[in-house]
Image (cartoon, rainbow, N blue to C red):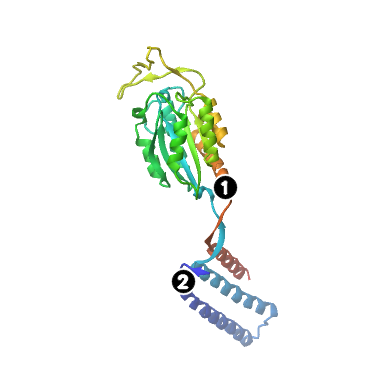
Amino acid sequence: MQFSQPWAFWLLILLPVGIFLGAANERFVRRVQRAFSLPSSTTQQWRRTARMITGGLALLALIMALSGPQFWAMLKDDPRHHLKLAVGIDVSKSMLAEDVLLDGPSADPSAVVNRLNSASLFALRLFEELGGEQAGLFFFARNGIEVVAPTRDQGFLRYMVQHTRLAKLTESGSDLKMAMVTGAELLGDHSQTAGAVILISDGEDTENNLDELISQAEQMNSDGLPVYTVGVGQPEEVYIPIRRPGGTGIEGFYTDAAGRHLRTRLQPANLQIIASSSGGRYFALSDTEPRQLARSLLSLIPQSAELTIGGSRSRGLKDLTPLLVAIGLVFYVAHCLL
């Protein structure tokens, strides 16, 4: 047992003073009763004695509460404090397609409504809902770019999402296998923690076949790194518009080397197979409001963290102050009712 505010024990001086004053009051009452020949029943004496005892116990309990008593106990760890997340945002050219609805203010109020801004808004909501996890941020297209190492500084994560001009980072092609590798490298050694990778993408992959994606996802599973995927966009094909900085309209559409207009669509199959093969889960951003989806995702990930940590327990201090305050209030109420 230890006390965070031991100075409060000086208030125990009030206890004998209170007992002395209560006893003096009791003697005064008895003298008055004898002087005026007033009857003194056993019940009245019992109530006065009980009032003194309950008042003294209430004062004692509240003084003990002020001292901040704590004792060492074995406490179950919160899995979220042992969890590292690597959040990846797809910045390939296909993410510039404007086939989404943006629910709520975007990171940049002047930004157009496209997959990229929808993905950054979801990442922003995800970081706002963190509850003790460490999280890192990376961008990926054909290559992965580590932006923020795992940290509990939610403000810095949100700042990077809000103030990075993702449209200037976009490049042709997308490599989901490299995205998984980048996420794993960002998490680094997670022997003392549980890890998970979150990919926000339209699911297009120009560099790998399905077997290669499955192989990498299974490797992530064997390493204890489930991949949770979030699909952005619609399954119908659309063109990818070209917008110039400061422009107010579309100047054209992206074309391939042969001059044909590029078309893109959400490809959930790639994201679903990655999630299922790695032990994660697939979500469609269009199905749920971003903040609610972020909460649902974060509520699922600790389940895998608990399996890794094994529900470990650690020695920690448990505070007795609330209990003593409640006991003191009970005695005070009893004192008032007697």
Q: Position of residue 1 (x, y in %)?
A: 53, 69
Q: For the point 47% across and 30% down, which residue is it?
A: 176
Q: Amino acid at mark 1?
A: Glu
Q: On screen, 103 above or below 25? A: above
Q: Nearer the viewer, residue 99 or 333?
A: 99
Q: Which residue is mark 1?
A: 306
Q: Position of residue 321 (x, y in %)?
A: 53, 64
Q: On screen, 148 above or below 200? A: below
First in residue order: circle 1 vs circle 2:
2
State if disc 2 and disc 1 touch (CB < 8 Å): no
Q: On screen, 30 above or below 106? A: below
Task: State which quarter of the image contains the C terminus.
Answer: bottom right
Image depth: mark 1 or mark 2 in front: 1
**Residue placed farthest to the right in the image?**
42
For the question of whether residue 30 can be seen, the reply is yes
Q: Nearer the viewer, residue 170 or 108?
A: 170
Q: Could you say whether the residue bearing mark 2 is in a helix, strand or loop? A: helix
Q: Position of residue 154 (x, y in %)?
A: 42, 44
Q: Say which mark, if any, is on residue 6.
A: 2
> Could you tell whether 26 is left or right of 144 in the image?
right
> Could you tell whether 271 is left or right of 167 in the image?
right
Q: CA distance from mark 1 to mark 2?
A: 38 Å
For label 1, the crowd category at 10 Å Cα-Cα, with few meaning under 14, some 14 to 19 and many 20 or more, is some
Quadrant of the image occupied by residue 165: top left
For the question of whether residue 104 can be seen, the reply is no
Q: Say which mark, if any, is on residue 61.
A: none
Q: On screen, 261 above or below 27? A: above
Q: For the point 59% across and 82% down, which residue is it?
A: 26
Q: Position of residue 115 (x, y in %)?
A: 44, 26
Q: Amino acid at mark 2?
A: Pro
Q: Nearer the viewer, residue 260 or 240?
A: 260
